[in-house]
Amino acid sequence: MGDFRLFHPIEDIEELKSDLKGDSQFLSYLDEILFKQQESELQQPLPNGLSLQQTNERAAEVITNLHREAFSKGIPMYYRDARATPPKEFIRANPDGSEDLVSLHLSTADYTLIKHLVPKGEGSWAFVLADR
């Protein structure tokens, strides 16, 4: 008889995990299997010849360099995280390392300041200022 494999959607496994006691051996076993699966997926080669992990690392490097270059020219960068409500709110990462919540008007490229989020040097992208 050949290799028999049983496949379950990841959502079903996550639901099963939530029903198990936190200190059960079976829960530890499931966590170990899921971790190994995720690690394996990160190492699988993509069409570009790189692993997902390598591709993510290169993308992060490119994005960091874009922020560094924009900040060196005094240009803010915009991104979205949980603090911004789609579709019009964005986080404006400023060249001084501060961040603001803004409403961005894409048709005119104007924005309205909603509120200051973090002061100079404390934003998520402030680390690129030290690299300059």
Image (cartoon, rainbow, N blue to C red):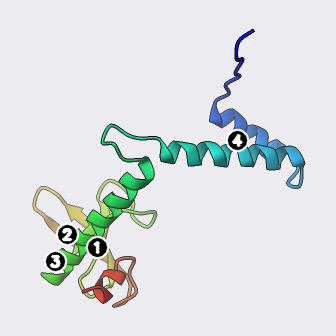
**What percent of the width, then of the height, locates residue 26?**
85, 43
Whichever of labels 1 and 2 marks the residue nearer the N terminus, that label is 1
- Rendered image quadrant of residue 117: bottom left
Q: Residue at x 26, y 80 (%)?
A: 94
Q: How crowded is mark 3: few (under 14 residues within 10 Å), some or many (20 or more)?
A: some
Q: Mark 1 points at which residue?
A: 92
- Rendered image quadrant of residue 4: top right
Whichever of labels 3 and 2 marks the residue nearer the N terminus, that label is 3
Report the mark closest to the observer, 3 or 2.
3
Q: Between residue 47 and residue 79, name the one nearer to us.
A: 47
Identify which amino acid the numbered label 2 is placed on: Tyr
**What percent of the width, then of the height, locates residue 32?**
73, 48
The C terminus, quarter of image: bottom left
Q: Mark 2 points at which residue?
A: 111
Q: Residue at x 40, y 54 (%)?
A: 54
Q: Residue furthest top?
A: 1
Mark identifier at residue 14: 4
Disc 3, SS: loop
Q: Mark 3 points at which residue?
A: 75
| For residue 26, above or below residue 87 | above
Q: Between residue 2 and residue 103, name the one nearer to us.
A: 2
> What is the CA distance from the residue labelled 2 to the residue labelled 4?
41 Å
Whichever of labels 2 and 4 marks the residue nearer the N terminus, that label is 4
* Residues at discs 4 and 1 in contact (Cβ within 8 Å): no
Q: How crowded is mark 4: few (under 14 residues within 10 Å), some or many (20 or more)?
A: few
Identify which amino acid the numbered label 3 is placed on: Ile
> What is the CA distance from the residue labelled 3 to the residue labelled 2?
14 Å
Q: How crowded is mark 2: few (under 14 residues within 10 Å), some or many (20 or more)?
A: some
Whichever of labels 4 and 3 marks the residue nearer the N terminus, that label is 4
Identify which amino acid the numbered label 4 is placed on: Glu
- Horizontally, residue 21 falls left or right of residue 39, namely right
